[in-house]
Image: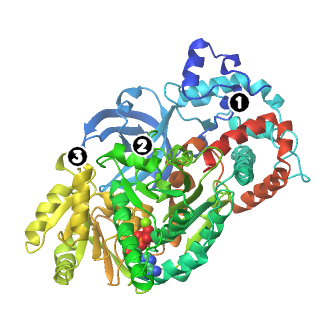
Amino acid sequence: MDLSAGIETVKGVGPKTAEILKRVNLRTVGDLLYCLPRVYENYQTTVNIEDLRPGKVIIRGKISDLHVVRTSRKRLTLTQGVIRDETGAVRTVWFNQPYRAKQFDEKREYYFTGKYELKSGRYQLTSPSATLVQDVNNGTAATFQPIYSAKSAIKPQMFHKLLENLRPEFAKIPDLLPFTDGKPLFVKPRARAEALYNSHFPETPDDAEKGRDYLAYEELFELILAAKLNKQENQRLRAESLKFNAKFTQAVVKHLPFALTGAQRRATWEILQDLEKNVPMNRLLQGDVGSGKTIVAALAAAQATLNGHQTALLAPTAILATQHFESLQTLFAGLQKAFLREFGKKIRLPRIALLTGATKNKRMLKTAIKAGQIDLIIGTHALITDDTGFKSLAFCIIDEQHRFGVGQRQKLLLKSPDNTAPHLLAMTATPIPRSLQLTLFGDLDVSILNELPPGRQPITTKILAETEQRDELYPKMRELLAKKQQIYWICQVIEEKNSGTATPVKKQVKKLQNLFPQVKVDMLHGKMKPEEKDAIMARFAANRIQILVSTTVVEVGVNVPNANMIVIQDAENYGLAQLHQLRGRVGRGDQPASCFLLTTGEGRPSKRLREMEKSTDGFYLAEVDLKIRGPGEIYGSQQHGELNLQVANLNDTTLMAQASHHAGNFAKDPAALKDYPELSSRIKKYQQLTTLN
Ligand code: ADP
Ligand code: MG
């Protein structure tokens, strides 16, 4: 069977169907074969409604009383109904799926699969998937069935039908992976054909699992091989060698307003070594919030400047870019003064500029950048637009790199002069678990700041029900304000009308201003104009605002060391990584800091919040997060949505080690790839998606 044959060659696919399939990127026979079931349903495990227990359940029954409810939250609709079998009835709810109200025939029986849980004091079946009982029993495997996701206009039944048409041909699916170094566990002749067959037509849960095991291995092998090849290719690119001037760096470090931590020294040293090479650096600087990544980047940028080349620093928000600009300006000016005093002459430090959407005179600034009159240009997405050109961009720093997509990073990296690639330093406070480092980021070198600057006080974290605010929280706020310190107050939404149950920023500003008339309360949110945001942030940094009520626009990077309390309202609505980032806004100075996680007080606080209360260690929390959500969720949407990892479990270190070993051996002779054309084209795709250069 030719997997690259067009989708229209599949029996049952007419021109119209082909058109629809192509729209969701199903272009070839292979695409269809790799359109794997989302889950498997074991209808033998159906339970009676009277026997329901919380958790994932399958029930068989008829549905009635369907109706759609619009909630006060602007875009949220609820579709409610009642499912009945002989033993009882249960309420069911779908969110934002109004079509559900018209989907069902009340006279027919369906299998409903979903989560049975307690919500607002009542038990319900949440967002179940549904299949006509008749459809299941007509299938060949009556009670154990693959379930496909609907893709736009294509119904799951369509996949069943098309795959059924292909079924006789499965035996002819060619092998994909090379049989190098003996026989890796999952790679034997016809392994792929069997695995795909088992995935689409399993008779038992065991079949399905066996199929998935091989396919997971295949995915991991491809990913790891792509990463290894990227690394090899990266080694072949040429970058400017930025000579390390030890005397200069030592002098700069000596005149900094603080002593570097050991971790900062190590990381700086690793980076400066890399910059000297004439192959592009590809390094991730990973350090928890507040660990002092910026200064490390600044020292590296100074080395680039000294070598006569330009550096670009890309930040995800204008607030952050502005703050970097201001703090580096202060830093370099301070250094310059110190040098003048000590040696009676100036040294060559970066001339810096800020480029954001709000920058006036963009044209003039861009001309100056192009002419090489700016050494370090700090900016947001405005930096990567097509009309921003450099004279000699040799070094790119990407702050909070997880905020950027692959395409955005590549656009910046392409701005270096022809035939060279810039050195890349990506910075993040969101630790990349080891498992992902091996695969997606296998071509990255990593420096870790595992030490906070000295004098940092611990951040105390406390979960608090809103009803306890008056007694527990306000007195602490008063105390802190009396010490002339400042407070962040985080709300989820801006205005009442889209707020649902969450408290909006505007309302909270009024409330807090009434409660604390002696201080200035103000707000910050994403809908404000960039200049307004900058102005508010500047006033907060100057302590002319004492309580800043804000949405999560302050989430990343913002640094106001005098702010020592953060209150996160409706804390249950945030993810663990986000809560940790938000909390990282405080405890950046030498005063004790606190974080309050406000909840509505209904039910027991979630595991996320309890973990937040227990630990301030970002690496630990990232592992917890990975366990709670899985890597797909964390890294899926932002950067690797395109990767479309279907089966691989990036937590499976044993499988990963095997695949890594196998891929490593194969990568020793990349020319061999040409004997594997299908593998080769799949790897190419992965390479493009995972590479940074
Ligand atoms: P992050 O790693 O979260 O980006 P920053 O680079 O914003 O952290 O640094 C946080 C704060 O710590 C800044 O105010 C910075 O000036 C300060 N800082 C950085 N390194 C040190 C150090 N070695 N000693 C004292 N303060 C430091
Ligand atoms: Mg930062």
Q: Quadrant of ligand 2?
A: bottom left
**Residue 300 in view, yes or no:** yes
Tag 3 near tag 2, CB within 8 Å: no
Q: Is residue 494 left or right of residue 59?
A: left
Q: Nearer the viewer, residue 488 or 604?
A: 488
Q: Which mark is residue 127?
A: 2
Q: Which mark is residue 30?
A: 1
**Residue 140 in view, yes or no:** no
Is disc 3 surrounded by few (<14), some (14 to 19) or many (20+) residues within 10 Å?
some
For marks 3 and 2 on the same chain, the one whose residue lies earlier in the sequence? 2
Residue type marked 2: Ser
- Residue tagged by mark 3? 498
Q: Secondary structure at mark 2?
A: strand
Q: Secondary structure at mark 1?
A: helix
Residue type marked 3: Asn
Residue at image coords 29%, 40%: 75
Where is residue 550 shown, x and y percent of the image? 25, 60
